[in-house]
Image: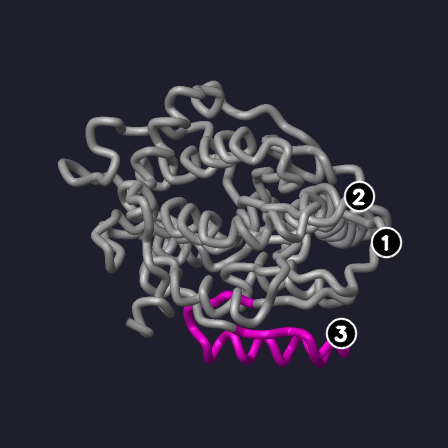
Amino acid sequence: MAIPTYCLVANIIFWPAFLVGAVYFLRKYMQGGQFTKKTDETGKVFIVTGANTGIGKETALEFARRGGTVYMACRDMNRCETARQDIIRETNNPNIFGRQLDLSSQESIRKFAAEFKQEQDKLHVLVNNAGVMRGPKMLTKDGVEMQLGVNHIGHFLLTNLLLDVLKKSAPSRIVVLSSIAHTLGAINVADLNSEKSYDEGRAYNQSKLATVLFTRELAKRLEGSGVTVNALHPGLVDTGLARNWAFFQTIFGKYLIQPLFWPFLKTPKSGAQTSIYAALDPELEKVTGLYFSDCKPKDVAPAALDDAMGKFLWTESEKFTGLDKPTVPSFLDSDKA
């Protein structure tokens, strides 16, 4: 009887240990590429949108750790201040600033850009990190479908308003967070703003395809300026972006499916690695118009290679933001008037 008992005990110990080990190594493998090069960013100025949590906070933290002056552009200033203090405490870098930026409000975007340029005459890296994912149909304060408005249109306006200072600071970089979801996307030419019909998944995929088309078109327009722009997929990251996904708010989704996904998700720190790579790797100083994942170049979807669609989207984005007009007064200019 001793041998069967021993085998039973061995199995009881072995299989749970094997399962825990397998989950551990799977989780570790899924963290993907890591940016490990040492760089000194002292004297350089960074803007990170959505920097109070998740990938954005980890990106800002790494820039601060390397000596950069970091502007955390956030909608919720209470959460921004908490994150800012965390970063200062962890890095002993006092040059971390929180500024309000609501990407669903073009007035807020113009105000942020104007006030930033009053404070700083240089900008070396702009990271368009903030985003929204799925959720019921909502509109920005300017009447744009929320996912298109925040993920693309808001960053389109912000980037254009900051191009002058980026050019003055060249070599400088723009980093655009997109998603593998762009491969499922299509630009709905007949209903870009989802006014006739709305599907949260299609709207999200369209917004992420828009970010890649924007990146490629902007790279062409900035050729020879010393300003590069690249897009990236951060990976499947354990952040709060899925909070608006109704399925994951059900009991079944929250307590059964989400735990099963956990081994396959990156931590926010790992999710930030490709952003940091695109922003800092010295070898990318003159690389522009590409798409990265896990700190390596990756092919984009065929739809993202449609140059005619990129030009169409640019024209429509200018109309959404008023940049198609000869001059658009800044927030501060209108204040003075």
What residue is pinned by disc 3? Answer: 91
Task: Give the extent of the magenta segment.
Answer: 72-98
Q: Nearer the viewer, residue 249 or 298?
A: 298
Image-based side of 251 in relation to 47, left or right: left
- Whole-percent x, y for residue 315 in the image: 33, 33
Give the total number of marks visible in the rendering: 3
Which numbered disc covers residue 282? 2
- Contact between marks 2 and 3 (CB within 8 A): the answer is no
- Whole-percent x, y for residue 250 in the image: 33, 56
Q: Under tag 3, what secondary structure?
A: helix
Q: Is residue 5 above or below residue 218?
A: below
Image-based side of 39 in relation to 260, left or right: right
Please state which amino acid type lies under the numbered disc 1.
Answer: Lys
Spatial CA distance of label 2 from label 1 is 10 Å
Colouring mode (rainbow / by chain / secondary structure / one colour): one colour
Q: Nearer the viewer, residue 109 or 80?
A: 109
Residue 90 magenta-highlighted: yes
Image-based side of 195 in relation to 43, left or right: left
Please state which amino acid type lies under the numbered disc 2.
Answer: Pro
What residue is pinned by disc 1? Answer: 38
Q: Viewer-nearest of labels 2 and 1?
A: 2
Pointer 2 or 3: first along the chain = 3
Which numbered disc covers residue 298? none
- Whole-percent x, y for residue 160 in the image: 46, 48
Pointer 2 or 1: first along the chain = 1
* Residue beneath the point at 59% across and 46% down: 174
Please state which amino acid type lies under the numbered disc 3.
Answer: Thr
Spatial CA distance of label 3 from label 1 is 15 Å
Spatial CA distance of label 2 from label 3 is 22 Å
